[in-house]
Image: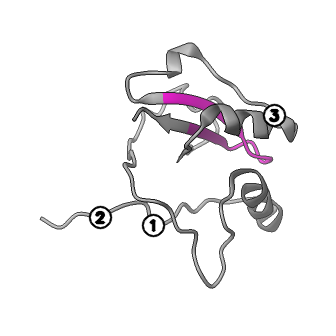
Amino acid sequence: MEKVNGIGGVFFRARDPEALSFWYEKHLGVDPVGPVPWKQREGYSVFAPFAQDTDYFGNATQQWMINFRVDDLAAMIAQLEGAGIEVETRAEWDSEIGKFARIHDPEGNPIELWQPNQ
């Protein structure tokens, strides 16, 4: 059986696509769309639909949430907070698969940050 081998892209609506793309590049290091796409290191990705009434994403009007892997969650949190970005952590989010934090981009989209356990 053939399988897809990773996330090829995440596409979503934005009120100001250019400004939002800049925010993702500046704060999370995601290269903007251009002649060469953003290249990720290999690793696991989770593809998981949630129940329509989930509160896991926070705001009930949000239809998606992206999860980015990070090497050092504490350093990423310090960097984001230093830029004035609110970071949410909860002890119950940390599990046998790693540590998690949550931020929101300027348009309110939830972003989960994940430092996998080694």
Where is residue 8? Give x, y as percent.
Answer: 45, 66
Q: Which of marks 3 and 1 is nearer the N terminus?
A: 1
Q: What stretch is highlighted in magenta?
A: 99-113
Q: What element carries label 3?
A: helix
Which three-letter amino acid code belongs to the residue tagged 3? Answer: Glu
- Disc 3 crowd, CA 10 A, few/some/many (<14, 14-19, 20+): few
Mark in the foreground, 3 or 2: 3
Q: Which circle marks residue 4 in the picture?
A: 2
- Disc 1 crowd, CA 10 A, few/some/many (<14, 14-19, 20+): few
Query: Is residue 45 in sight in this rendering?
Result: yes
Q: Quadrant of the C terminus?
A: top left
The residue located at (43%, 60%) in the rendering is: 7
The residue located at (58%, 33%) in the rendering is: 57
Asked if marks 3 and 1 touch (Cβ < 8 Å), the reply is no
- Which residue is tagged 1? 8
Where is residue 33? Give x, y as percent.
Answer: 65, 74
Q: Is residue 86 left or right of residue 112?
A: right
Q: Is residue 63 left or right of residue 44?
A: right
Does 91 appear above or below 5?
Answer: above
The residue located at (39%, 29%) in the rendering is: 97
Which three-letter amino acid code belongs to the residue tagged 1? Answer: Gly
Asked if marks 3 and 2 touch (Cβ < 8 Å), the reply is no
- Which residue is tagged 3? 81
Magenta part, dominant SS: strand
| Disc 3 to disc 1, C-alpha distance | 29 Å
